[in-house]
Amino acid sequence: MSSEFTQIPPISSTKPLFTLTNPLVSFPGHSSPQLLKCQIKSQENFLFSLCESVTKTSLLALVSASLFFVDPALAFKGGGPYGAEVTRGQDLTGKDFSGKTLIKQDFKTSILRQANFKGAKLLGASFFDADLTGADLSDADLRSADFSLANVTKANLSNANLEGALATGNTSFRGSNITGADFTDVPLRDDQREYLCKVADGVNPTTGNATRDTLLCN
């Protein structure tokens, strides 16, 4: 019985099994157009994925860089736990915050001269070491706000509610209008309390408490 076997050519140790060329791929002994198309398509998909990855990386780098180079004119936008502005350590002289909800907003060390906070909700806001000279805080909700070391001279605090606010250190309210303000549970230095009692008047429209009573005036 005779059998015929297809002779397989020996694989050369010096000749690669297949050769990659750009954009075509050739296989010794195999020149199927369909195989070539599949290989080209595979290369195209790889190049597309590579370009897409590079594009995403470049975009991410651009966005990251933009966070460090902000136009100074837009510097007070983009932060704060509740408000829309970055308000810590800023010069916000004359800015209008009237009627805004700025609960726990951070105004630490900011310059807020003549700023308008009329009717604003500022529960728990921090004005630590801030300059509020001449600011309008009338009708504002300032419960538990921090005025430690703040300069609140010549400000308008009429009808403001400062229940539980902090006023430790060298906080000064000299020259301020406190008619109808509520200072319940506000820790004040003896000299500040004595001064405020001399000018205290009115009743807070929200709490119904007389300003002099909240200051524990004699």
Image (cartoon, rainbow, N blue to C red):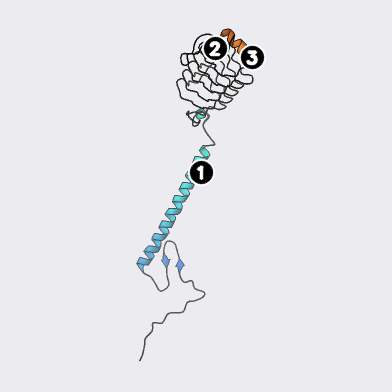
**Which residue is denoted by mark 1 in the rendering?**
61
Question: Is any atom of residue 177 visible in this view?
Answer: no
Residue occupying image coordinates x 41% and y 64%: 24
Coordinates of residue 170 in the picture (x, y in percent): 64, 19
Other residues around mark 1 within 10 Å, as few (<14) / some (14–19) / many (≥20): few
State the residue at coordinates (62%, 14%): 192
The reply to whether dot 1 and dot 2 touch (C-beta < 8 Å) is no
| Residue pointed to by mark 2 | 213
Q: Please state which of residues 53 and 204 is positioned toward the viewer in this rendering.
A: 204
* The image quarter in which residue 25 lies: bottom left
Q: Residue at x 52, y 39 (%)?
A: 65
Per the image, the residue denoted by label 3 is: 190
- Alpha-carbon neighbours of circle 3 within 10 Å: few (<14), some, or many (≥20)? few
Element marked by disc 2 = helix
- Badge 1 element: helix
Q: If you read the primary sequence from the N terminus, does the residue marked by circle 1 or circle 2 appear first?
A: 1
Q: Position of residue 183 (x, y in %)?
A: 55, 16
Of marks 1 and 2, the one in the foreground? 2
Which of disc 2 and disc 3 is earlier in sequence?
3
Cα distance between the residues tagged 3 and 2: 15 Å
Q: Measuring from the top left, give residue 212's x and y in whole percent.
A: 55, 10
Q: How many marks?
A: 3
For the C terminus, give its image quadrant: top right
Is any atom of residue 24 visible in this view?
yes
Q: Residue at x 46, y 50 (%)?
A: 53
Which comes before the other along the chain, label 1 or label 3? 1
Q: Quadrant of the N terminus?
A: bottom left
Could you say which is closer to the camera, residue 137 or residue 72? 137
Which sits in the foreground, 195 or 21? Answer: 195
Q: What amino acid type should be assigned to the residue bearing mark 2? A: Asp
Label 1 with label 3: CB-CB less than 8 Å: no
- The amino acid sitting under disc 3 is Asp
